[in-house]
Image (spheres, coloured by chain):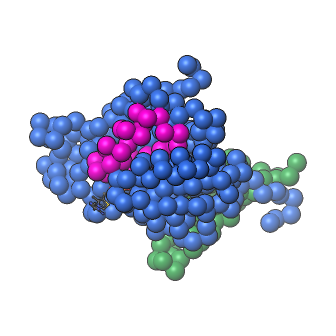
Chain colours: A blue, B green
Amino acid sequence: MKEGYKLIYQKPKTLRKKRMHYCPGCFHATTHKLTMEVVEELGIQEKTIGVCPVGCSVFAYDYMDVDMQEAAHGRAAAVATGIKRMHPDKIVFSYQGDGDLAAIGTAETIHACNRGENFTFIFINNGIYGMTGGQMAPTTLEGQKTTTSPYGRDPKKVGLPLKMCEIVSQFDAVAYVERVSCNTPANARKAKRAIKKAFEYQIQGLGTTFIEVASNCPSGWKCTPEESLEWLKEKVFPYYPLGIFKNPEEK
Amino acid sequence: MPAKGYVEIFVEGCKGCNLCVINCPTDCLALKTSETNSYGLHYAYMRDEDNCIACQNCAVICPDAAITVYKKAS
Ligand SMILES: Cc1ncc(C[n+]2csc(CCOP(=O)(O)OP(=O)(O)O)c2C)c(N)n1
Ligand code: SF4
Ligand code: SF4
Ligand code: SF4
Ligand SMILES: [Mg+2]
């Protein structure tokens, strides 16, 4: 350190030193970092259990230095339900992509939310199946080209993109729902605050907490990280607005 | 006057995504286009060491937590 200066930010100690395999600019990495900053700040490293999905974040357990359980594709909400019920004193979160949470795992997601299971969903919605090479997801935007919608998503054939925050905020047992992003420093700070609030509400036993990250996939979207930020602003946010959908403080 | 802050960028941890560069309000950062790290990626560095305001924007946006920020002790 240079003389006369003090350290004000460094990588959280709860994030392992290991290099993450994510593509440059991918918000999976940003969200891992922010989640682990929250764990460090709340001092809950020894009490936190994460459930990781199948998808690009399948190796999340290699990066986040908390206890983690791998779930079969789409089953993270069911696994998190079991863990939280057996260990109600632990802070439990599922970390899932949109293919995982909103396609193959829709049933688990909906029913865990309807039951008000007291864990936190961290939902990375990048509108695509990143890991398997960029196929259409339930969240792919209308007209968006993917390897399985080469002419653009056609809602007449496959419906409109699923709005998970809007859906799960309808359940009485769900306590807190917010959609965030990491496209600017200000939004990344908000995303971190949302994850922190979700964990705090979970500790208070308020019910299901659900944080959707309007995320990117530069590789699947076939663009640079910078261009992915433009796509988010121009295409994603108008359809998937950021903000709080359900807030226990307003009840 | 010495700068209000400075950053250290972990060269092997940087993936050259450029997000820190475009989010620095005082334009202190750039990618080293003439060099790569061992992964073959152009990494970010402090292009201008005099104007960092220690705002942490670069560190907050960096997906790979490759940036450490220091502030002038008052
Ligand atoms: C039972 C089962 N069906 C299908 C697959 C293939 N598969 C792996 S990841 C994935 C989708 C991943 O997409 P998403 O959840 O959006 O994660 P991302 O990679 O975009 O973060 C699919 C269909 C699988 N591994 N297991
Ligand atoms: S394929 Fe997409 S979601 Fe997966 S690591 Fe790369 S950019 Fe991220
Ligand atoms: S701390 Fe702020 S001013 Fe300094 S390099 Fe980072 S973004 Fe630029
Ligand atoms: S944001 Fe991080 S990974 Fe991207 S160029 Fe800057 S230091 Fe490198
Ligand atoms: Mg996805």
Q: Of A177 and A73, which appears nearest the observer? A: A73
Q: Is residue B57 above or below residue A186?
A: below
Residue at 33% in and 35% down: A163
Figure quadrant, ligand 1: bottom left
Q: Is residue A156 above or below residue B7?
A: above
Residue at 48% in and 56% down: A51
Q: Is residue A167 above or below residue A102?
A: above
Residue at 55% in and 50% down: A86
Name the residue at the bottom extreme. B38
Residue A199, magenta (yes or no): no
Q: Is residue A196 above or below residue A246?
A: below
**Within the image, what quadrant is residue A186 found in?**
top right
Which quarter of the figure is the N terminus of chain A placed in?
bottom right
Residue A122, magenta (yes or no): yes
Name the residue at the left extreme. A157
Q: Is residue B6 visible?
A: yes
Residue at 45% in and 62% down: A70
User: Which contiguous range is marked in magenta?
Assistant: A97-126
Which quarter of the figure is the C terminus of chain A placed in?
top right
Q: Position of residue B58 (x, y in %)?
A: 60, 53
Q: Is residue A237 visible?
A: no
Q: Position of residue A185 (x, y in %)?
A: 57, 45
Name the residue at the front extreme. A86
Q: Of A143 and A51, which appears nearest the observer? A: A51
Q: Position of residue A46 (x, y in %)?
A: 68, 57
